[in-house]
C-alpha cells in the first residue's frame, strides 16, 4: 500500500542510484557521439582490413596472375590442394611414412611450415627461460642487483633496431670466409685453420635466425615480466617465507600462478609475430638458401607473389597462415587463461545482479 | 627484519657468490647485445682492406671516404630518409589521434555495441591481419595507388593494437568528473576530447607515438610490396639495396649506410630509454 508521495521519492532515489552506478562504471550518456568517434576506425577497418581479407580469400580460390589479370578463373580448392600436396605419406607403408618425415625430401611448402615453427620455438623457449630468470633476479628484494634500469634498457635496445638492418648486420658478420665471425674464430681464437662458410650450412642458418630473434626479443619479454612481477603483492612472499618456503617453492607457487595472464600474453604475441617472420630470413637470403632451410611461410608467400606473379597461390598461403595462427592463438588463449578468475568474475557479476534486483524489489 | 636475522655468515657468503655470478651473466649478455652493433659502427670507419684483413673493436680513419663514397652513389640515403619521414610522421599522427579517439569513445560513452566493439578489438589483436597482404596489394593496384605512400598511411587510422593500448591506458588515466564538469560548462563532446582528454593523457600519447613511430619506421614488408621505384624507397628498402653486389668493392660504405639506418632510433633510445621502457608496460598489462 504505497501513497503517491512515497512512490515519487523512490523514483528519485532509483534515478540517483543508477546515476551513481553509471559514474562508477565510467560511462556517460550522449552515446550518439561515440558512433561519430568510432566511425573513422570502422570505415577504414572495413575498407582496408575486412575487405582485403575477404578479397584475399576470393583470390585464393582463383588462378589470378598479376601479369594476366583478365584471364582470371575460379579454380576452387586447387591452390590449397597444391600447397598441401605431399604433406602426408602416400600410403601407410613403413617406407612412405619414413619418407614423409625426411626433411630433405619435403616440398618447399612443407619445409616453410616446419622452418617457421622450428625457428620460432628454438627462439621462444630460451627467450622465455632466460627472461624469466633475469626477471626473477631483477625483482628479487633479496639480491638487490644494482643499476636494474640500465641493464634492462641495454638488453631491450636490440628490439628497437630496424629488423631489415639487423638482418643485414648479421649477414655481414657471417657472410663468407673473411667475415668478422670467421676473423674472430680463425684469427683470434684459432678454432679452425680456415674460415667456415656459415651461411652454406642449413642448421647453422636456421639457428642463426633463431638467435637473432632471441637477441631482438628477450629484452622485451624481460621488461614485461618484471612489470608483472612487481605487481605481485610482497606480503604473499613474506608470509610464504615465514612458513619456511624456499626460493624455488615461492617461484612455483606464487610467481608462476600470478604471472599466468602475462605469460599467455607474451606467448600469444610472440606466436603471432613469429608466424609472420619475414624481414630477417629474407635479408639473410632472399632465396631461402641453403636449400630453402630458412624459407618461412611469409617468404614463400612473397616469392609466389613477386617472383612468380601467382597471386592466387600466394593468397592461399596467406589464408592458410591466417587460419593456422588464429586457431593456435585462440587455443592458447582459451586453454591457458585463468579459469578460476573467469569463474569468479562470472559469480560476482551474478551476485551483483541479484543484489541489484533485491534492492529494487525491496524498495518498491 | 626476518631476512636479516636469518642470514648467517655463510648466508652472506652465498649471497655474495650469487651476486657475482649474476653480474657475470649480465655483463656477458650486455656484450652480446652491444657487440654486433658496435662492430658495425667501427667498420663504418674502416677501409675495405682493413675490414677484409681483420676485425677490430677500435675505430679507424676512413669514415669520411666511406661517407663520400656512399653519398656519391645512387643509394639515395637522403631520399630514403625523406620518404620514411613522410610515411612515418603521418601514419604516427593518424594512429595516435584515431586510436585515442576510438578508445575514448569506448571508455566514456554508453552505446549499444560498446561491449561487442570492445571484445571485437581484443580479438583483432590476436589475428594477424597483415596476412591479407595479397588482397591489399591487388586492391591498391586496382585503385592505382601502388608506388604511392597512401597505402602505407591511411590504414594507420584503424590500428587495433594501438586502440587496445589506448583503452587500457585510459581506463586508469581518465578523470570522469573533469569530463562531467566540462560538459556542465558547455564544452562540446569533441571539445572535451581535444581540450581535456588529450592534455590529461599525455604520457600515454607519448608512449603510443614512440611505438607507432618505431613500428612504422622499421616496417619492411608492406613498403617492399607497395613501392617499386627507388625514388619512393623508404629507409629499410634502401638498406636492402646496400646488401647488393655492387658494393662489394667498398664494404666500409655499406657499413656507413647501415649505421645511418639505425642511428636515429639509437639516438632516440639513448635520450628517452627510461620513458620507452617504462611505457612498454604502461597500458598493455593493466588487466
Image (cartoon, coloured by chain):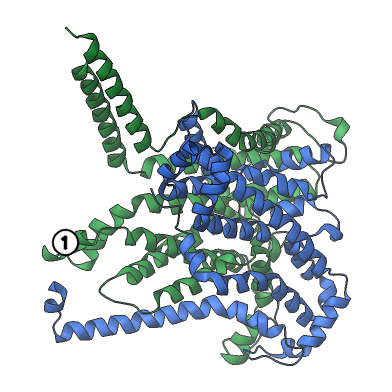
Count of numbered tags: 1
Residue A8 in the image: above or below residue B145: above
Residue A74 in the image: above or below residue B94: above
Where does the image place residue A304, in percent across and percent down from the top left? 75, 47
Residue B43 in the image: above or below residue B101: below
Where does the image place residue B168, in percent across and percent down from the top left? 45, 47
Where does the image place residue A333, in percent across and percent down from the top left? 42, 43
The residue singled out by tag 1 in the image is A240
A51 vs A39, nearest the viewer: A39
Q: What secondary structure is found at the residue carrying circle 1? A: helix
Give chain B's shade. blue
The residue positioned farthest toward the top in the image shown: A1
Res. A10 image quadrant: top left
Q: Is residue A278 visible?
A: yes
Give chain A's shade. green
The quadrant in which the N terminus of chain A is found is: top left
Amino acid at each position: 500500500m504505497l501513497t503517491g508521495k512515497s512512490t515519487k521519492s523512490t523514483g528519485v532515489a532509483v534515478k540517483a542510484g543508477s546515476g551513481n552506478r553509471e559514474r562508477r562504471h565510467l560511462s556517460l550518456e550522449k552515446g550518439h557521439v561515440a558512433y561519430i568517434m568510432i566511425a573513422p576506425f570502422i570505415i577504414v577497418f572495413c575498407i582496408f582490413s575486412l575487405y582485403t581479407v575477404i578479397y584475399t580469400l576470393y583470390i585464393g580460390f582463383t588462378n589470378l596472375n598479376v601479369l594476366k589479370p583478365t584471364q582470371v578463373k575460379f579454380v576452387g580448392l586447387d591452390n590449397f590442394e597444391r600447397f598441401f600436396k605431399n604433406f602426408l605419406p602416400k600410403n601407410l607403408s613403413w617406407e612412405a611414412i619414413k619418407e614423409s618425415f625426411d626433411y630433405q625430401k619435403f616440398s618447399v611448402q612443407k619445409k616453410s611450415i616446419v622452418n617457421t615453427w622450428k625457428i620460432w620455438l628454438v627462439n621462444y623457449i630460451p627467450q622465455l627461460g632466460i627472461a624469466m630468470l633475469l626477471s626473477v633476479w631483477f625483482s628479487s628484494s633479496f639480491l638487490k642487483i644494482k643499476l636494474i634500469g640500465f641493464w634492462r634498457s641495454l638488453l631491450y635496445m636490440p628490439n628497437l633496431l630496424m629488423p631489415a638492418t639487423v638482418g643485414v648486420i648479421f649477414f655481414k658478420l657471417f657472410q663468407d670466409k673473411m667475415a668478422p665471425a670467421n676473423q674472430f674464430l680463425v684469427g683470434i681464437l684459432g678454432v679452425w685453420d680456415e674460415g667456415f662458410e656459415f651461411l652454406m650450412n642449413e642448421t647453422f642458418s636456421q639457428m642463426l635466425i633463431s638467435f637473432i630473434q632471441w637477441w631482438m626479443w628477450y629484452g622485451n619479454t624481460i621488461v614485461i615480466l618484471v612489470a608483472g612481477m612487481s605487481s605481485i603483492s610482497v606480503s604473499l612472499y613474506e608470509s610464504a617465507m615465514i612458513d619456511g618456503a624456499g626460493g624455488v617453492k615461492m617461484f612455483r607457487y606464487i610467481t608462476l600462478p600470478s604471472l599466468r595472464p602475462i605469460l599467455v600474453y607474451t606467448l600469444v604475441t610472440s606466436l603471432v609475430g613469429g608466424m609472420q617472420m619475414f624481414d630477417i630470413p629474407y635479408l639473410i637470403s632472399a632465396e631461402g638458401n641453403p636449400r630453402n632451410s630458412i624459407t618461412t611461410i611469409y617468404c614463400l608467400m612473397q616469392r609466389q607473389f613477386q617472383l612468380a606473379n601467382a597471386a592466387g597461390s600466394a593468397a592461399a598461403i596467406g589464408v592458410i597462415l591466417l587460419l593456422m595462427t588464429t586457431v593456435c592463438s585462440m587455443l592458447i588463449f582459451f586453454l591457458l587463461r585463468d579459469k578460476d578468475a573467469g569463474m569468479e568474475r562470472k559469480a560476482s557479476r551474478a551476485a551483483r545482479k541479484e543484489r541489484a534486483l533485491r534492492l529494487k524489489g525491496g524498495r518498491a | 627484519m626476518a631476512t636479516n636475522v636469518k642470514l648467517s655468515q655463510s648466508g652472506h657468503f652465498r649471497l655474495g657468490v650469487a651476486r657475482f655470478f649474476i653480474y657475470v651473466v649480465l655483463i656477458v649478455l650486455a656484450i652480446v647485445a652491444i657487440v654486433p652493433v658496435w662492430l658495425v659502427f667501427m667498420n663504418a670507419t674502416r677501409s675495405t682492406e682493413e675490414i677484409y684483413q681483420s676485425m677490430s673493436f677500435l675505430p679507424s680513419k676512413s669514415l669520411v671516404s666511406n661517407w663520400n663514397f656512399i653519398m656519391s652513389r645512387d643509394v639515395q640515403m637522403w631520399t630514403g630518409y625523406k620518404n620514411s619521414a613522410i610515411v612515418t610522421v603521418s601514419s604516427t599522427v593518424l594512429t595516435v589521434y584515431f586510436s585515442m579517439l576510438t578508445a575514448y569513445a569506448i571508455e566514456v560513452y554508453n552505446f549499444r555495441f560498446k561491449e561487442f566493439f570492445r571484445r571485437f578489438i581484443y580479438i583483432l589483436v590476436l589475428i594477424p591481419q597483415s596476412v591479407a597482404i595479397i588482397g591489399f596489394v591487388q586492391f591498391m593496384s586496382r585503385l592505382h595507388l601502388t608506388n604511392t605512400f597512401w597505402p602505407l598511411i591511411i590504414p594507420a587510422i584503424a590500428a587495433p593494437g594501438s586502440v587496445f593500448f589506448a583503452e587500457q591506458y585510459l581506463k586508469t588515466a581518465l578523470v570522469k568528473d573533469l569530463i562531467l564538469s566540462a560538459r556542465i560548462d558547455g564544452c562540446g563532446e569533441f571539445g572535451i576530447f581535444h581540450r581535456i582528454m588529450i592534455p590529461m593523457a599525455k604520457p600515454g600519447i607519448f608512449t603510443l607515438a614512440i611505438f607507432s613511430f618505431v613500428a612504422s619506421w622499421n616496417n619492411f614488408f608492406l613498403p617492399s610490396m607497395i613501392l617499386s621505384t627507388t625514388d619512393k624507397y623508404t629507409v629499410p628498402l634502401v638498406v636492402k639495396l646496400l646488401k647488393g653486389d655492387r658494393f662489394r668493392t667498398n664494404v666500409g660504405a655499406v657499413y656507413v649506410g647501415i649505421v645511418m639506418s639505425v642511428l636515429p632510433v639509437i639516438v632516440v633510445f639513448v635520450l628517452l630509454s627510461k620513458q620507452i621502457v617504462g611505457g612498454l608496460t604502461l597500458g598493455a598489462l593493466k588487466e
